[in-house]
Image (tube, rainbow, N blue to C red):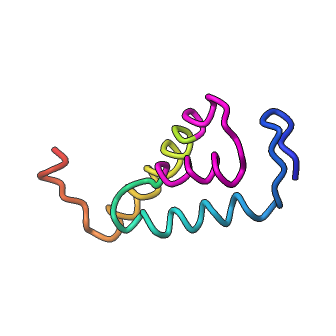
C-alpha cells in the first residue's frame, strides 16, 4: 500500500495491526498510546515529516472516547474525581 502524500510504502495490514497492539497495551493504563506511535512512524515507516504530531493528535481524538466509554461501561469511572 502506498500513501502518496507521505511517500510511505507499507503492507496494508501493518497500520491496523500496530494500532491494535498499541491500544491493547496502553488502554488498560488509561492512556491513548500515541506516544508509542511516534517511534513507530519515524523508525519503521521512515515518516519524518512535521505532520507526525498532528497524526498522533488524530489518534488521541479517536482513541480517548473509546477508552472513556469502556471505563463508564465497566463502572470504573471515578466520578468524584471527574467532577
Q: Is residue 51 left or right of residue 3?
A: left
* Count of picture labels: 0
For the stretch drawn in magenta, the main secondary structure is: helix
Q: Residue at x 83, y 42 (%)?
A: 3
- Residue in the foreground of this view, choosing between 60 and 1: 1
- Residue 80 lies, in percent from the top left, at 12, 52
Please, is residue 50 above or below residue 18 in the view? above
Q: Residue at x 71, y 45 (%)?
A: 46
Please, is residue 35 above or below residue 14 in the view? above
Q: Is residue 20 left or right of residue 1?
A: left
Q: Quadrant of residue 72?
A: bottom left
Q: Residue at x 51, y 38 (%)?
A: 57
- Residue 8 lies, in percent from the top left, at 80, 44
Please, is residue 36 above or below residue 52 in the view? below
- Residue 48 lies, in percent from the top left, at 66, 37
Q: Quadrant of residue 73?
A: bottom left
Q: Residue at x 49, y 49 (%)?
A: 34
47 falls in the magenta region: yes
Q: Is residue 77 left or right of residue 73?
A: left
Q: Residue furthest left?
A: 80
36 falls in the magenta region: yes
Q: Which residues are magenta?
A: 34-55
The quadrant of the rendering that contains the C terminus is top left
- Residue 61 lies, in percent from the top left, at 50, 42
Amino acid at each position: 500500500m502506498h500513501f502518496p502524500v507521505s511517500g510511505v510504502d507499507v503492507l496494508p495490514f501493518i497500520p491496523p495491526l500496530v494500532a491494535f497492539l498499541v491500544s491493547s497495551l496502553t488502554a488498560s493504563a488509561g492512556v491513548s498510546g500515541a506516544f508509542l506511535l511516534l517511534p513507530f512512524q519515524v523508525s519503521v515507516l521512515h515518516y519524518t515529516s512535521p505532520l507526525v504530531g498532528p497524526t498522533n493528535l488524530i489518534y488521541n481524538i479517536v482513541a480517548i472516547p473509546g477508552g472513556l466509554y469502556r471505563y463508564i461501561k465497566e463502572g470504573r469511572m471515578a466520578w468524584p474525581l471527574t467532577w
